[in-house]
Image (cartoon, rainbow, N blue to C red):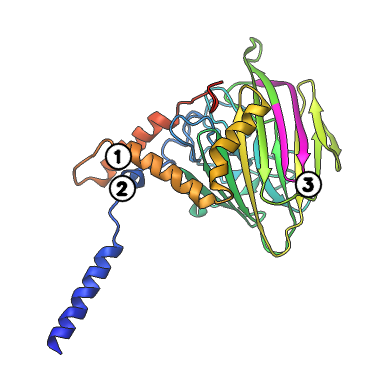
Amino acid sequence: MKNLNKLIVLLCIVAASGCTRQKEPVDYVDPFVGTSGNRWMLFPGPCMPFGMVKLSPDNTDDYRMDAGYEYKNNSVTGFSHVNEWKMNSFLTMPATGEIKILPGKKDDPPGTGYRSRINHDTEQASPGYYSVLLEDYGIKAELTATTRGGFQRYTFPKKVNGHILFDLQVPEEDRMKIIEASIKKVSDTEIEGYVRRIGGGRRPWNEYILHFVARFNRPFESMGGWQGTDILNETDEVRVTENSDIGAFLKFKLGKDPVVLIKTGISYVSTKQARLNMETEMDKYKWNFDAVHKNARDTWNNLLGKIKVEGRSETDKVKFYTNLYHSYSARTIYSDVNGK
């Protein structure tokens, strides 16, 4: 009996030790470091090393050299795909209730805009993953990414219909103007679009065009949008050829299934290339959000693990691996999967 008790104790110790996982290099990265009063290249959202897509929350009111995400702000306007040196893309935002086309002010959510309050206690960020609860809508937003694509999982409140906004007039580090832009319905599960911008205020510079494709795991009930201040409740395309507000909203009848998944691909070459980037990097995962997240985490862990840091200071390890992470996440590949 005494030997049996010893065996039970030994098995318990072995089981307990097996449940204690040693920290890996990726576990020391804190993506929130540097997200207050800093540049747009320091952001909490997911990306891959040198990722073209840097899918991250935005919450500033207007153009500014500080980060598109400012940690001191307790709200977000949505999730943009390019957090880059004087460049941005388009923004996605899930919502419920009345359609609103303006983001609103950071200190007055929801007010007249679609911005939502957040509590930083509900935010999670690690290499390849970000999540937050949008308090004004009760929606949990989760993000992950491939090199040229974004993957989003929105969990709405049960039995509440919702919509997802695509806003093309979003701030970046410099004053910018839209030259032309379009969002078009391809099918009831896919849209595509582009936006051509130029920055620089009185001295225009850095003209570029970004193309995108977004595909959903379920059909949307209808597509609407806005061109300037004109709201179109039913349309297959919104388009502007001048510096004007432009965006689209997709309505979903959710019922008992509250989850909407979105795959996106971008390209600086063409919409066809954006779709190629998305399909090449995403199709092998089908609609498995967690598999894409795992791939991103494993990729980062293998890269960061090339350097092993020893010592007792956990703080120093956080500093080292976070800065090593920033040296890869703050730079960008611009070529597509086929080299274009």
Residue type, label 3: Ile
- Direction from residue 12 to residue 123 in the image, left or right: right
The range drawn in magenta is 176-194
Q: Give the label, 1 or 3, closer to the camera.
A: 1
Magenta stretch: includes residue 180: yes
How far across and how far down the image is residue 223, in percent?
Answer: 80, 43
- Residue lying at 30% horizontally and 64% vertically, measured from the top left: 19
Which numbered disc, 1 or 2, marks the residue that appears first in the sequence? 2
**Marks 3/2: CA–CA distance:** 44 Å
Q: Main secondary structure of the magenta part?
A: strand
Magenta stretch: includes residue 336: no
Residue 101 appears in the figure: no
- Residue lying at 63% horizontally and 27% vertically, measured from the top left: 273
Q: Secondary structure at mark 2?
A: loop
Mark 2 and mark 3 in contact (Cβ < 8 Å)?
A: no
How far across and how far down the image is residue 211, in percent?
Answer: 66, 27
Residue type, label 2: Glu
Which residue extends farthest top?
Answer: 203
Which numbered disc, 3 or 2, marks the residue that appears first in the sequence? 2
Residue type, label 1: Gly
Which numbered disc, 1 or 3, marks the residue that appears first in the sequence? 3
Residue 140 appears in the figure: yes
Q: Secondary structure at mark 3?
A: loop
Q: Which residue is mark 1?
A: 305
Q: Which residue is mark 2?
A: 24
Q: Which residue is mark 3?
A: 99
| Residue nearest the viewer, comparing 78 with 166 | 166
In the figure, 193 relative to 117: above or below? above
Neighbor class of circle 1 (other Cα within 10 Å; few <14, some 14-19, many 20+) is some
